[in-house]
Image (tube, rainbow, N blue to C red):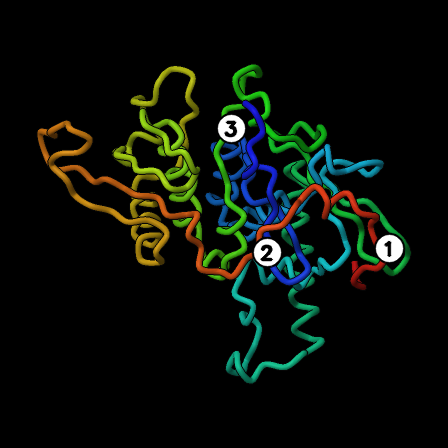
Amino acid sequence: MAKSSSTRAGYQYRPGIVGKHVFRVRETYVAGAAAEMLRKRQVGAAKLDLVLRGIALWPEHAGQRTPGLVLRRNISYEDLHDLCRDPHVFTMTLPEDAMYDPEIVDKKREWVRAQLQILERRKLVRRVPFAAGRRPDIIVLRDDGSEEEFDDPGARAGQVPGNSYVNVHGPVISDPRFGLWGAPELAAYYCAMTAERFDPQPPSVAGTGEWCRPVGWFGGDRRPSGHVTYPFGERTIRTGLLALEEQGWISMRMLSRWRGSRFARRRRVVANKFVNAKARVKIVDLANHRTGSPSKKSAQGS
């Protein structure tokens, strides 16, 4: 599949932090490592993994650096925490009254370290010592647990078995609502993007399509041959879809007719709205941003 402008464009996730506009993960990753983390209530690690994949260097942007490197310039552990969780989770005062508190910063850093340990055990990231007193470099690895170099599975999706992928949106994982997601929302997001991609009439812009699949389709035997089934429970998917609708990420309608066909009974039709994130993000030229010389400056702590 050719690289589109959207899959190589960049978005400002937070001030000073630029990540990918759209990137892709394997369906086998969703069904494997991601689903297992959600099952074990490691949703924080699952979300951090997506954030890291969103900001890690593509091979073509790495230059002499390691593909998958997370540039330490302007990216602190506190930023990583706040992209994955409510920034005020450790704050005892009202958000508008919150001030810099070293104790809260330490708690956020410790939380990120704990999630990184989970991701390391799953062979999704690797930490490399940088310098005494400094946090280690984070290297994001291929999402299949092989410990091979970070890649884009969509680049050869039709040529390499197991590279069937799901699109993930930078505007979604940089949105404050993402920090409030639990396992149901993340599972439903994966399902919504999978259903859209395999719809007979896929949208021209990923994240804007409509689809009509029963929740049992994702993990049952109704998936076509060669598709990857997801081990998410039907109740989890339903709960997640309702939450995404409440947050404005999707809309759902019960219809008896759709695309010129009449149903024997009314069915739920879902419209994805993932490109309409409410967060104020800025599109940038990712290639120029990423190929610049990296700074040695980094946040303290390891």
Disc nearer the start of the sequence (1/2)? 2
**Circles 1, 3 touching at the beta carbon (< 8 Å):** no
Q: Is residue 300 above or below residue 256?
A: below
Disc nearer the start of the sequence (3/2)? 2
Task: Give the tally of numbered discs.
Answer: 3
CA neighbours of label 1 inside 10 A, class few (<14), some (14 to 19), many (20+): few
Q: Is residue 60 above or below residue 222?
A: below
How far across and how far down the image is residue 99, in percent?
A: 63, 81
CA neighbours of label 2 inside 10 A, class few (<14), some (14 to 19), many (20+): many
Mark 1 = which residue?
296
Q: Is residue 282 above or below residue 217?
A: below
How far across and how far down the image is residue 300, in percent?
A: 81, 64
Q: Quadrant of the N terminus?
A: top right
How far across and how far down the image is residue 37, in percent?
A: 52, 43
Q: Residue at 79%, 48% (x, y): give it.
A: 137
The numbered mark at residue 13 is 2
Q: Is residue 59 left or right of residue 159?
A: right
Please, which residue is most extreme toward the right here? 132
Under tag 3, what secondary structure? Answer: helix
Q: Quadrant of the C terminus?
A: bottom right
Under tag 1, what secondary structure? Answer: loop
Q: CA distance from mark 1 to mark 3?
A: 36 Å
Dot in front, 1 or 3: 1
In which quadrant of the rendered view does residue 277 lie?
Answer: bottom left
Going by the numbered disc 2, the residue's amino acid type is Tyr
Please, which residue is most extreme toward the left here? 264
Q: CA distance from mark 1 to mark 2?
A: 21 Å
Pick whichever, 133 or 164, lies toward us.
164
Q: Is residue 111 above or below residue 264?
A: below
Q: Residue at 54%, 55% (x, y): give it.
A: 174
Mark 3 = which residue?
28
CA neighbours of label 3 inside 10 A, class few (<14), some (14 to 19), many (20+): many
